[in-house]
Image: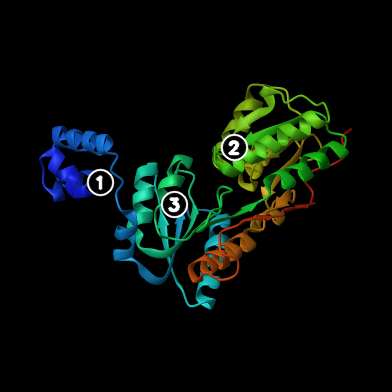
Amino acid sequence: MVTIKDVARESGVAISTVSNVLNNVGNVSAETSKRVMETVERLKYVPNVNAKYLKSCKKNTIGLFLSSIQGDFYRQLIQAVHIQCKINGYMLNIYVSNENTSEEIYGMILSSGVEGAIIMNDGLGDEYMERLERINMPMVFIDREYHSEKMSSVVIDNDYGVTQAVEYLIKLGHRRIGYVHGVQNFDEKARFKAYCKVMKKYDFPVEEKFILNGYFEEAIAYSEMYLMLVRGAELPDAFFCANDEMAWGCIRAMQAMGVQVPEQVSIVGFDDTILASYYRPGLTTVHSPVVELGSKSATEIIRLVRREGIEEGTSIRLDPQLVLRDSCRLAK
């Protein structure tokens, strides 16, 4: 088996230099870095990530790796994970990336040394799954469906939730139903796919002019909807929004421009955040079981760490439920 010593000898540098290049630390010249990496590729050297992980492993500590902590969704998620960890005698460390690359997020997970990791970070590309497999660390993903010997996933069944919502709008008599996108992560892609599937099932067109991008943020959704209305664009019968914040942004923009919700346009969101029932009108939305998502992901990572129950990881889907309030009405 090729070792780091072999790479150092073939590259004509010290072992510490190879280590610095592989970990992207230290003051190594571009020329030397290139020579080392060419040697790594030529010799097909694979770093011993297990040794690095085991050396720094923090017992009884779970890591929660997120791309954001803003908003009610993340507050509920973190609290649920924390409670379950506390009940089972585990510390919880939270790691938040800020537009980091996949390589940087991978390095964050590896260097954390936690005993198990819960990961919801769309910045981590799928191509890194094989590398994560080589780390001797149990992991639970809540942003993608994946399972193996030491990895599990706990995800929300977006298809089921969106299908309930869009079919409800159709039952109300709506035929032209728009969609407001979030950022292109696992949930958004699944939600848009489900929306398109339902529209196709009922032979209704997905009209590009009724598709907006809100990036999961209220302010952006407000701006997009406001601009659409200022331009005098035609409105659909209803909008399905990929989260509640965007739904409320759309409603506020319509109210500012004199468009009545739900009298003129019905609106449905996704998540059922705490504020959803306080909006005026109250928001019809898909209740996302965020507390259960956090609790089950924590329970599953602790099971994997303790090697309890079945011998390998598994995939768990949680069912969301449609909650009816006042932002929808029968089509005229």
Farthest residue to the front: give it.
1
Classify 129 as above or below 306: above
- Circle 1 residues within 10 Å: few <14, some 14–19, many ≥20: few
* Residue at numbered disc 1: 2
Q: Residue at x 52, y 57 (%)?
A: 149
Rendered image quadrant of residue 63: bottom left
As drawn, the label of residue 221 is 2
Q: Position of residue 98 (x, y in %)?
A: 39, 47
**Type of amino acid at the residue the image marks with label 2:** Ala
* Residue at numbered disc 3: 133
Q: Residue at x 68, y 33 (%)?
A: 179
Q: Residue at x 52, y 76 (%)?
A: 88
Q: Is residue 13 visible?
A: yes
Q: Position of residue 59 (x, y in %)?
A: 38, 72
Say whether residue 239 is left or right of residue 116. Answer: right
- Circle 2 residues within 10 Å: few <14, some 14–19, many ≥20: many
| SS under mark 2 | helix
